[in-house]
Image: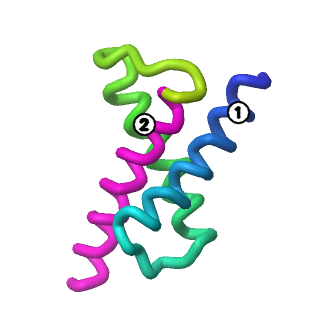
Amino acid sequence: MIGWIINIIMSGIAGWLAGKIMGSNFGVIVNIILGIVGGAAFNAIFGVILNFGGILGGLVSGVIGACALIAVGRAIKKG
């Protein structure tokens, strides 16, 4: 139970960091949500292969996943 809570918190921080890295203009709340969703998606897809784990693994997977989702969001927004 605590592991999931820590992962959500770290993914939220990762979303904030990804927003800073990518220069996102979606807003802080959306960046945090993208970090949570992107971190979960990236960890589910690549976590087993790359053996991400722990707090640092959650942060790294969250930043990578959120950056990917921000890039997709930009592409959709440009239409």
Q: Determine the residue positioned at 42% across, 53% down.
A: 66
Q: Quadrant location of residue 67? A: bottom left
Image coordinates for residue 49, horizontal then vertical, percent: 29, 16
2 or 1: tag closer to the N-terminus? 1
Residue at the bottom extreme of this rendering = 78
Q: What secondary structure predominates along the stretch shown in magenta?
A: helix
Q: Position of residue 76 (x, y in %)?
A: 27, 75
Q: Residues within 10 Å of mark 1 (few under 14, many from 20)?
A: some
Does 15 sit left or right of 51 as displayed?
right
Q: Residues within 10 Å of mark 2 (few under 14, many from 20)?
A: many
Disc 2 from disc 1: Cα separation: 13 Å
Residue 58, magenta (yes or no): yes
Nearer to me, 56 or 3: 56
Q: Seen in the image, is 18 located left or right of residue 75?
A: right
Q: Quadrant of the N terminus?
A: top right
In front: 58, or 37?
58
Q: How is the image coloured?
A: rainbow
Q: Nearer the viewer, residue 45 or 61?
A: 61
List x then y, in percent, for residue 60.
Answer: 43, 37
Pinpoint residue 26: horizontal percent, then vertical percent.
48, 78
Asked if the magenta segment contains residue 76, the reply would be yes
Element marked by disc 1: helix
Residue 55: image tag: none
Specify start and end residues of the magenta stretch as a single range.
57-79
Which amino acid is tagged 1?
Ile
Which residue matches tag 1?
Answer: 6
